[in-house]
Amino acid sequence: MSDHASAPRTLAADVSGLEAGAPVVLQGWLHRKRVLASVAFLVIRDRSGLSQVVVRPEDALFEQLGDLREETVFTVRGVASANDAAPGGIEVVSPELTALCDPAAPPPVELWRPKLNTGLPTILDHAPVMWRHPVQRAGWELASAAMQGFRSSLSDLGFTEIQTPKIVSSATESGANVFQVDYFDRKAFLAQSPQFYKQQMVGVFERVFEVGPVFRAEPHDTARHLAEYVSLDAELGFIEDHRDVLAVLREALAGMVGAIETTAAPAVERLKLELPRVPDEIPVIHFSRALEIAGAPADEPDLAPAHERAIGEWAKAEHGSDFVAVEGYPMAKRPFYTHPQPSDPRWSNSFDILFRGLELVTGGQRLHRYSDYVAAIEARGEKVESYADYLQAFEHGMPPHGGWAIGLERFVARLTGAENVRQVTLFPRDLNRLSP
């Protein structure tokens, strides 16, 4: 056994900090093999990055190079050696390899190439392997950092993280676009959002957030919609109106971007991204003004994607901001629990945040008086009894409150400039895809 056999594992990212002559124990995948006449190079990939291993004719391993297959998992024991041409100025020499799995089958594409030069269907069909590509993986490293930033920023503001049921007895938003499931011979649904539950928990913790999946039976197949995605939800009590919600949301967005800067810097570099700056105050315009900016008719009930792009361009030109809030959407286009604008009940105390010209967040102030809920539900022609479980919290006293929901994959897609949200979703579920 060699002198360095018992040395602790060294991550690829830490090899550059070793002194020449130090023992090295790498564990990872054989990312690439290049065999030349008088030398060979093996690139080992682990969770932290890549490290170069040099094999020379005098090494016993040189005769075995033909049997080594890329993507096989190895332990590599060797010695650190200075080389200005190597990544970080240090490479590994005098290597000994021990396979930790059977020889790997060739991947669908060569993962060592700088880019995955293949179509999206191939990437999605082979997702368990394709996500190993450093550039592909970077997209989810951003998502992971964003979730960390969301959690930490809200925790610092006194929020409690909750987890709510994903199998529910009735639709949250409406009867449309829900997945029905057989629940012990009873009809149930996959939750469209944690909306009802997070509102109820304001009556317990005052400030709550959740990171979890939501399910929408979207009948269309577009580049921006998924049937299952990760939603970053929050709800907070004792507010004056939706502007208080927007101010806390700003802190969450800043926390998400800040966490990406500090914990996912290598991924940002790999993707050559320009991260947005979250302004101290996100620009706010009324829905009616947004229609004017977009050149849309004054009676338009909602913003189309083209309108969102136009408003995003305006925000960048006028305020230098990648974010803009549109408030006061028509009540007719908002859920029944939305609080109307006190000065003109045609409009709502709600908002959407557009990020680089795409809707990212929907939020606002909710109704909080039991009597208002009774009136809103009856105005829809529905029975109050159908919402009895939900209304318990309001019947027993609830403070003014509001909240929001951010689509994680949509945020990352916009951040990276991905043309399709599926490019940054680990295992997308949509109208046509149920596997892998």
Image: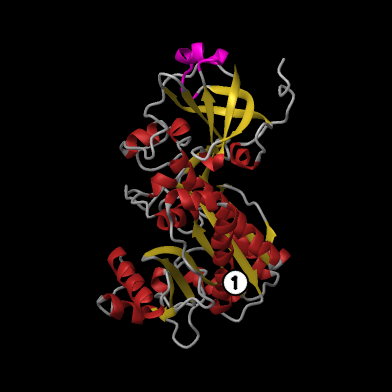
Residue plotted at (32% across, 50% down): 222
Three-letter amino acid code of the residue under disc 1: Val
49 magenta-colored: no
Q: Where on the picture, by quarter, is residue 146? A: bottom right
Which quadrant holds the C terminus?
Answer: top left
Residue 47 or residue 221, whichever sits in front:
47
Residue 212 or residue 186, whichever sits in front:
212
On the image, the x and y values in percent for residue 434 come to 42, 35
Viewer can see residue 213: no
Q: Report whether 208 appears left or right of 383.
A: right
Residue plotted at (42% across, 41% down): 429
Q: Element type at marker 1?
A: helix
20 versus 227 height, above or below: above
Viewer can see residue 162: yes
Badge count = 1
Residue plotted at (60% across, 58% down): 149
89 versus 257 height, above or below: above
65 magenta-colored: yes
On the image, the x and y values in percent for residue 264 come to 55, 52
On the image, the x and y values in percent for residue 328 come to 43, 78
Provide the residue designation for mark 1. Answer: 248
Residue plotted at (65% across, 64% down): 154
Q: Where on the picture, by quarter, is residue 135? A: top left
226 versus 10 height, above or below: below
289 versus 14 height, above or below: below
Which portion, as a residue range, is magenta?
57-71
On the image, the x and y values in percent for residue 53 come to 54, 28
* Badge 1: residue crowd in 10 Å (few <14, some 14–19, many ≥20): some
The colour scheme of the drawn protein is secondary structure
